[in-house]
Amino acid sequence: MKRLLFPITVFFIMTTIGCTEQGKTGMTQGLNISDMDTTVSPGESFYQYATGGWQKANPIPDEYARYGSFDKLREENQHQIQALIQELSGQDYENGTNAQKVGDLYSIGMDSVKLNSDGAEPIRPLLQKIADVVSKEDIIRVSAQLSKVVSNPFFGFSVGPDDKNSSMNIVHIYQSGIGMGDRDYYLLQNEHSQNLRAAYIKLMETQFQNTGYSEADAKKAAANVMKIETELAGAHVTKEMRRLPELNYHKLLVSELDNQVAPFAWNIYFDELGAAGIDSLNVSQIEPVKAAIAIIEREPIEVLKDYLSWKVINSAANYLSDDFVNANFEFYGRTMSGSKELRPRWRRTIDAVNGAMGEAVGQLYVEKYFPAEAKERMLNLVENLKISLGERISQLEWMSDATKEKAQEKLGTFIVKIGYPDKWKDYSSLEIKDDSYWQNIMRASEFAWEEMMDELGKPVDRTKWYMSPQTVNAYYSPSSNEICFPAGILQPPFFYMDGDDAINYGGIGVVIGHEMTHGFDDQGRKFDKDGNLTDWWTAEDAARFDERAKVLVDFFDNIVVLDTVHANGTFTLGENIADHGGLQVAYHAFQKTDQAKKDENIDGFTPAQRFFLSYAGLWAGNVRDAEILRLTQIDPHSLGKWRVDGALPHIEAWYEAFGIDSEDPMYVPAEERASIW
């Protein structure tokens, strides 16, 4: 699928929920008292106090590495989508319609008999193309061709807005090419990383043998791949450095690439990708791309062919026979994340259909499950949150009037997208056939590639969506200065159509404030109201911002997530700032509601207490130790527990709502708390 180069900040990853009921004892819409653990005081661990009952009642199913209230919503969404798709797959539709394509792709993905009968045959044509390579030019040509359908070989290529001219789409190339997700897995010498490397080599050996290699040839090929990926990882910029957009922008003329990056058959590379004739591009990370080119130049062709073959095998594994799928799960699911059981085939297939034809599924989804009145209430909430953030900006004592003026301009030009796009994507050129699951996934990838390449050199389409409507998530894009809330997230426990203001402001209200604050976090603040990477702050204001942000960096750096492993305050800074800002802005807006002004209890809780309990409920969940380690390594979001117990100690209103004082373990002296937005 298309790769997005320009930064997009999302609310969370892999999340979901089901509706609560009304009328039961101890339960009002949006707040289930049994989800709490009142044996723990609010100031000891608010996360445990607010969600301990939920954790006890919802142990992690074997197919999950992490299971939370979000995952429950995602399950409900998948059941809804499954019903829609099964209805399609059980009927005859005219060939070429979205209904035919969605239904047929689901049926193909569910056909385990054919998948197991096909074995590795669906990837034979690509593997043969690699086997036919005889020169380094062939390697470059085939690598470019593979980029359209498999995970980036050597380095990545994408088309997206120019960071410093956000109205136009340009080419970006960037570091990529490794299979374990982060450079540290290849480089760190701790026991955990060493065990992962050994397991990854075992995965490669198994999958090469599943493809037809002898045991000896599989071991040799795996060693060759590991050698290349380790060298690529060694040159990669750290995840902390990738958070600095000004250090990941190097716009060059194509004629400068040989001198500024490395001599390379750039004309062959760009021709094969469909980018012939471009005159300039952004090289996001120069040294990693230079290192990748050096590997291509130095390594024997047979070694490079093993690497390219692995890119095909690993990208296709989940769409092949059970041998491939199970081996893939053993490493990426069980070893890396701690999951005990492979997810059911129907869930995996729905994810694939969503990935291939997201808006086609989304159009069906919103027609059945997203009422128009929900969009209207969301628009009102967003407007209230914008007013609240504007008021807080105007009251900041640490920011100068000059920077405040530009901040207000940026806030005033936010593009707001709610529910679903105004214009649906046209899938008429995408063919879904009965040949094989993998070949259909390839065609979907090629469709997305052509869609992306069609944008090259053209003005940016500000109406485009970067998430499908059924997605349970939200995002902010600095390059377009937009916030987006798909229909999938506009359900409990985020949003209750008939719920009281406290739970909605504590839920979706904080999500809205979170995404708005991303426009002013450590990354987003470096983009102006038009989405251009430019310094619109005074030097003094920027220094004061960094000083205040460092309070959060230091606070989260001191959090122990498991054994001796600490959270990464620098890597998670943007999301922690957004959580902090979202809470402040949403609570400020909530104070203007009639419910907050009347201050009447519901189920024994004040409106303010319900606000914070609603927020904590978003993060109710359990997580396996292996997943704690993996997420701490690769996820810019803090773990759910710390999005509560790490965020709330910096919110004065929380102390007041629950009477938290200096005797409580979570208490942080006022002078040591973060105060930004």
Image (tube, rainbow, N blue to C red):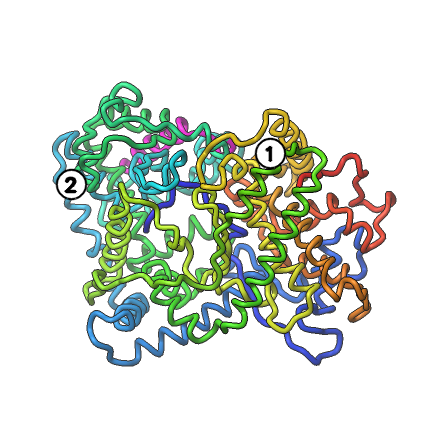
Taking the image as shown, residue 390 lies to the left or right of residue 259, namely right
Total marks in image: 2
Residue at x 56% of width, y 61% of height: 70
Left or right: residue 81 versus residue 212 is right
Q: Earlier in the sequence, mark 2 or mark 1?
A: 2
Give the amino acid type for the residue marked by disc 2 in the picture. Ala
Magenta stretch?
Answer: 220-240
| Residue 642 % position (x, y) | 66, 47
Residue 173 location, quadrant:
top left
Give the left or right position of residue 61, taking residue 500 as reference. Answer: left
Name the residue tied to disc 1: 403
* Residue 215 seen in the figure: no
Residue 246 versus residue 602 in the image, above or below:
above
| Residue 652 in view here | yes
Task: Assign the C terminus to one quadrant of the image.
Answer: top right
Q: Position of residue 87 (x, y in %)?
A: 35, 79
Q: Which residue is mark 2?
A: 131
Q: Are marks 2 and 1 in contact (CB under 8 Å)?
A: no
Percent x, y for residue 629? 56, 43
Q: State the residue at coordinates (31%, 45%).
A: 459
Q: Is residue 18 magenta?
A: no
Dot 2: element: helix
Q: Report which quarter residue 324 is drawn in.
A: bottom left
Q: How would you rate the neighbour count of disc 2 (Cα within 10 Å): few for under 14, some for 14-19, many for 20 or more? A: some
- Please tell me the numbered disc located at residue 223: none
Q: Is 234 a magenta residue?
A: yes
